[in-house]
Amino acid sequence: MNHFGYKNGTLHAEDVSLTALADWVGTPFYCYSRATLERHYKVFSGALPKDSLVAFSVKANGNLGVLKTLALLGAGADVVSGGEMAKALAAGIPASKIVFSGVGKTKEEMHQALTAGIYQFNVESEPELLALDEVARELNKIAPITLRINPDVDAKTHAKITTGKAETKFGIPFKHARAAYAQAAALHNVEIVGIDVHIGSQLTELEPFEAAFTKVAELAKTLRADGHSITRLDLGGGLGVPYQNNNMPPPDPIAYGKMVARVTGDLECRLIFEPGRLIAANAGVLVSKVLYLKKGDAKTFLILDAGMNDLIRPAMYDAHHEIVAVEEPGPGSERVPYDVVGPVCETSDLFAAGRDLPELNSGDLVAILSAGAYGATMASTYNARPPAPEVLVSGTEWAIVRPRLRHDDLIAQDKIPDWLAG
Ligand code: LLP
């Protein structure tokens, strides 16, 4: 459920008209709903065993306004870079609720995280383990660690967002796990606290989760028998969201929570979750204006002022995003097939091919739905386009939480060397 809907014929975010927002802010822009972020967070955390840590995956949406919204509810953060960690801290998420994942943490990032005193490092390889031990020794600290295990389970999702198969770069192979834990136990500046797993994103079935968590639960018992202290299980993120109304809906958080309790309950571990998309995707839309309607020989193109630099998911993963007119079409109004494209000079700058939409014209506004996760965070300045700004709505209030860059801001990022300046 989300808080975007038509009121008096105009699409609103909570109580704010998107047409009015477009007048105030200009287009394109991202618009997030605070009430939806809160609802998703509460539904998910309420479905989990008590005392679980919900560490929002910052890569899904790193806007400080969004992070602060979640911080106020008690959320932690799952970060994969020093930059994400700095943002989480800046939004008021305490270090004691931050977990650091990722296959390529640098020593500088380890230093930063150890100094901040984060909750845990999810270590993804033996060389990373040795590097972390070394940095912790230099700082005279003990790094709390889990090892991320690659369970070799098929997440049944898009190939580019599956992470739990043996051939992906993520985690330590399941069959090396005992040896890697033995290696970790022999080091003086890391402390084993648990096991970590994350098998992919936009999972639409529970079964792959269950297969992975079952393997993790078995491993926990084996590792305990080997003498390790396993008190936490980090079960990653990945629960999918409905992008299309007519689709089979992904499992709901209640079913997921029950399955987790059944599979891991007897271990009495503290559970950690890293949801990203589930919290943010349907809490955000990308509002864009139709620039031109272009009738080609084979197709009719709706050319928007938002492009793949603002939202790359359709180009990168063939992702489906619903597109709706901001001004509600009248009952029984005709629908026309459009190729909805952006202005970027790439054929892949295509939001939807042959999509039936109400008749639209130059100047009309559309909203690309489910764009709150992996939208703004994956934006770029390709074609020297300032990425869409971000707006957060709360009831009747709204605020620009990331302003639109000006051309001067883009120019200021580059430097002409003295020896070229003439
Ligand atoms: N934890 C780890 C270690 C991850 O790698 C990810 C996502 C998450 C948690 C959060 O997963 P979520 O709950 O959001 O599914 N850009 C792609 C998605 C990439 C996901 C990468 N890792 C997309 O737009 O579909």
Image (cartoon, rainbow, N blue to C red):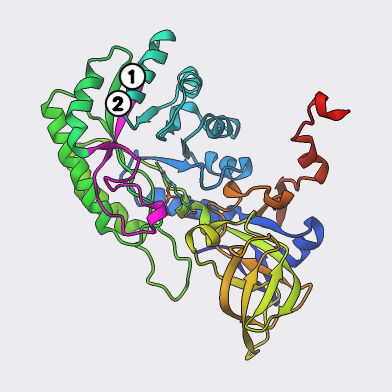
The Cα–Cα distance between marks 1 and 2, rounded to whole angstroms, is 6 Å
What number is the disc on residue 363? none
Magenta-colored span:
144-173
Membership of 151 in magenta stretch = yes
Q: Residue furthest right?
A: 422
Count of all numbered marks drawn on residues in the image: 2
Q: Residue at x 30, y 20 (%)?
A: 191
Q: Residue 418 appears at what percent x and percent y?
A: 82, 24
Residue 142 lies left or right of residue 3; in this view the side is left
As displayed, is residue 417 above or below residue 273? above
Which quarter of the picture shows residue 220? top left
Q: Residue at x 69, y 83 (%)?
A: 359
| Badge 1 element | helix
Q: Residue at x 41, y 53 (%)?
A: 160
User: Observer-nearest residue: 310 or 121?
Assistant: 310
User: Observer-nearest residue: 2 or 202?
Assistant: 202
Residue 333 lies left or right of residue 245; in this view the side is right
Q: Residue 267 appears at what percent x and percent y?
A: 19, 38
Q: Is mark 2 within 8 Å of ligand 1?
A: no
Which quarter of the picture shows residue 311? bottom right
Q: Does residue 308 appear anywhere in the picture?
A: yes
Q: Residue at x 36, y 59 (%)?
A: 157
What number is the disc on residue 126? 2
User: Observer-nearest residue: 272 or 215?
Assistant: 215
Q: Amino acid at mark 2?
A: Glu
Q: Amino acid at mark 1?
A: Leu
As displayed, is residue 296 above or below residue 179? below
What number is the disc on residue 130? 1
Membership of 403 in magenta stretch = no
Q: Residues within 10 Å of mark 1 (few under 14, many from 20)?
A: some
Asked if the residue under mark 2 is in contact with the one under mark 1, i.e. CB atoms within 8 Å, the reply is: yes
